[in-house]
Amino acid sequence: MTTDSTIAPEGATTLTIREQWDTNLATWEAAKVAADFAFAAYSTAHDEAKGEDSPGLAKLADLAETTGEAQSQAFGALILTPAPDHGAVLRKMTALYAPREVEGDEHSDAWVQAFPEAVIADLERLQSEAASAWLDQWTTEGGSVVIDDEGRLQVAYRADSTHQPVPSGLGEEADRQAARWLDGRYHGIMTTLYDALRMFGGASAIKAHMRGIGTRQIAPKEQGK
């Protein structure tokens, strides 16, 4: 970000929802790690015991059951948490219906899986298209986007419009008013675009799209190009 850039404002319209989502997502991810670790420990001990019960094995079984239940509860809480953006909806759909090994009738499993996979594909495509359209407009108007070293999205735009008014022939005051109008229009456009970013998925959608096309930085486009 250059010194003549303005950091896009951090809106608060979905802050409470987002904080709750982030908290529940972190809780589920931590519970999943604990449950996977406990189950792996039990499985290894069970195989080594070759079917013989022992107090130690029983404790590992209890731990696997307890952590598994905690993971299930955290997962349910996450799914029932309101999604702050389209990216969170996609995360829910993927967590619920992403391909995985399942037991049951092969034909039925494949048939049931096909529908949610189609919905997931739609969400991914629509999110990518929205991100691409937003980035095109943002950079055309003079904005820039960077994914920093910590994986956060940084969006910025110039402090003033680069549009130069054509001399009106009505005097300097009229020209100054025209310049102020152009700057006001520019800031209005950038504020509206930032608000739109939050509405369709925010930083997660833009980062997913940028990573998909293999870039971490997109500079402003030159006017007229």
Image (cartoon, rainbow, N blue to C red):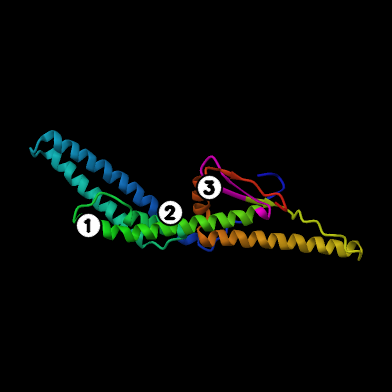
Percent of width and height locating residue 4: 72, 47
Mark 1 or 3, closer to the camera:
1
Q: Amino acid at mark 1?
A: His
Earlier in the chain: of badge 2 and badge 3, it is: 2
The residue depicted at 22 percent of the width and 49 percent of the height is 66
Q: Which residue is mark 1?
A: 107
Instruction: Tell me if mark 2 has few (under 14), some (14-19) or many (20+) residues whose alpha carbon lies within 10 angstroms of its own.
Output: some
Percent of width and height locating residue 37: 27, 41
Q: Is residue 219 left or right of residue 179?
A: left
Q: Which residue is mark 2?
A: 22
Q: Secondary structure at mark 1?
A: helix
Q: Is residue 74 left or right of residue 17?
A: left
Q: Which residue is mark 3?
A: 210
Q: CA distance from mark 2 to mark 3?
A: 22 Å
Percent of width and height locating residue 60: 18, 41
Instruction: Tell me if mark 1 has few (under 14), some (14-19) or many (20+) residues whose alpha carbon lies within 10 angstroms of its own.
Output: few
